[in-house]
Image: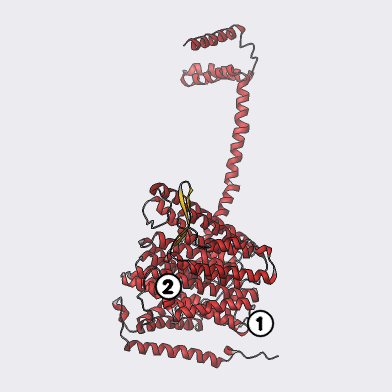
Amino acid sequence: MINGLHPAAILIIGAFVVPLLSGRVKQAYLLLLTAVAFLVALSLSEGTYWTLSSAFLGHDLVFGRVDKLSLVFAYIFTLMGFIGTLFGIHMKGDGEKMVSLIYGGCAVGAVLAGDMITLFIFLELMMLTATYLVWAKKDRASYYAGFRYFAVHALGGLCLLAGILLHAHETGSIAFDYIGLSGLSSVLIFIGFGVNCAFPILHAWLPDAYPESTITGTVFLATFTTKSAVYLFARGFPGTDLLIYIGAVMTAFPIFIAVIENNLRRVLSYSLINQVGFMVVAVGIGTELAINGAIAHAFVHILYKGLLFMSMGSVIHQTGKINATDLGGLYKSMPFTAICCIIGAASISGFPLTSGFVTKSMIVSAAGHEGLVIVWFTLIFAAAGVFHHSGIKIPFFAFFSHDSGIRTTEPPLNMRVAMGIAAFLCIFIGVFPNVLYSILPYPVDYVPYTTPHVVSQLQLLLFSALAFTLLLRSGIYPAEIRAINLDIDWSYRKGTRLFLWLLYNPATRVGQWGSRLFFECIPAVVTRMSLNPLAVIAITADRARMLFASEQHKGVIKARIEKERLIYPGDIIKSWPIGSTVLWVSVFLLAYLLIYYL
Amino acid sequence: MAEKQYLFDKPRNVKILLGALFCSIALLVIIDYFITKHPEFYWEEYPSFYGVYGFVACVVLVLVAKYILRPIVKRREDYYD
């Protein structure tokens, strides 16, 4: 049954028209296309649509499984597609615009996919388009980061494919529903999703690649891949205990690196892992409140993280710089961008009246309800930490701190409007949380604005601000320095060099030795022995005799061997009389005759 | 050529901002005594639990990042080139 157009189809097919247009027409077309995709997503009603019966080896392919869980993601992906497109609409180059649309379309396709084959195809297309977006910056760093992104995700994709095939073999169905962690197939699928979700140890592609993309590319990258993975876990693995602990680690470890990181977009990449960690914890808890919290947090996270990446993109666009050591004092010439950045920073920190407050608290409360003490403490720690590095550090070092002397202007109007829309939504959802709560998968009876809750959250944040102020003023706060920080990607960036060194040095030597042995030494010996095999046999036999001979015989045999070796190969004819040749021929003929009759 | 004075170029404005922060904190600590809490855990009832925890968390975070993590992971910018 066809119910109008699939929002993913609108974006993907519509992308191919982009190169045919130019100027204002193209800009209007891009905005119209993404706006239509958003409106179509809004108009979807629950049900199963766009099914191809028995299209894949007798299995049904379902392109439109529309329920409350997938709908929320379809809304926010298409909405952010519109905002991100508006943000980058003035940029040159059709390739990036096309690929961004396809990337977003595939993300929508992935969350609406009802079977694992469709899902897999959309995820792999996302991986390819995302790689292109990393490359789109067209410099050396993005070129290599893109390859690493591709390699890690290709491995994750293979893992996922193996898991899907095994799962389909075990269950006889390719439908994508609850999987749960049991057996090899589910573990492979879990890891495949986990790569996209930036699980600890599998996470390094994210802070490696995202800061290397273009200013608009990063906005799209930060929106789709990790959040679609959160959806996949919410669909396939809700209530899996392991996710609670993985998520808790994700919330905590990136903030330590973020504190000492100099590249501000890399700081945001680490805080992205931290925020996704909250969602993963919530999916792992799996209660109605927790799943609602995870989905709501994914929704608002896309907006404020997009806003933060847009504000840092504006800084790059206007100054060409992104390291904290090169920036500072920009509030003087970019006040609007600074305000937008602060609104994004307040949202990610969860200040009351911003979107982060009304969603993060659902997750922390869900952990509290379940009595997960250590996880609860970790989440509060991470909430304070994220305020520290994203909430304060990002706006402070970019827009305030010491004056870098840079005087520039605000970014173009379309960038400001895009940031303004995102900033507005961050506050709107914070003030009217019920608008968001009403579209969540389960009914919400959660009230975020209670006096103790507001007071405790404000205490947490303002005391963190106090700690920042005191540490900064006392000089203990780590100065921003021009340096990079190692992460897990060290293992494969240096690991491949070790591999190449091993290849060039020991392995080459073994190869040379092998080729000498097999192409020089052995053929030489064989050639020499075949000059007179009988003499070789005689010498070998004499040598064997030496082992068992008595002392006086040894001398005789030794002399004979030396004589034999001296005259080798000698005259073959002489030691090979005609008679014996005839004898051997007869023996072989006889043997042949016997074999024939047997 | 004297440049235009901006908001935080005046030390007085920075002082006002810091003063506002300290006052808000003091206010929160006071309010904390007068509200009825609905805690999940008993320690949430301790006075200013969240404030103390947030403060300690941030100090520990910065000290660990600066004195333990940075010496291990810091490299020159051209390390991978």
In the rendered image, the vertical position of residue A228 relative to residue A415, given as above or below: above
Query: Which residue occupies the extreme bottom position in the image?
Result: B12
Query: Would residue A351 be found to the left or right of residue A540 on screen?
Result: left
Q: Residue furthest right?
A: B1
- Which residue is tagged 2? A382
**Where does residue A469 sit, x and y in percent of width and height?**
48, 83
Residue A10 shown left or right of residue A297 in the figure: right
Where is A115 relative to A289, above or below?
above
Tell me the amino acid under the disc marked 1.
Arg
Q: How many numbered marks, from 0 up? A: 2
Q: CA distance from mark 1 to mark 2?
A: 35 Å
Q: Secondary structure at mark 1?
A: loop
Which of pointers 1 and 2 lies earlier in the amino acid sequence? 2
* Amino acid on which the number 2 mark rests in the picture: Ala
Q: Position of residue A598 (x, y in %)?
A: 46, 11
Instruction: Tell me the subunit letter for badge 2.
Output: A
Marks 1, 2 in one chain = yes
List the residue tagged with mark 1: A407
Which residue is more in the foreground, A220 or B27?
A220
Callout 2: 10 Å neighbours few (<14), some, many (20+)?
Answer: many
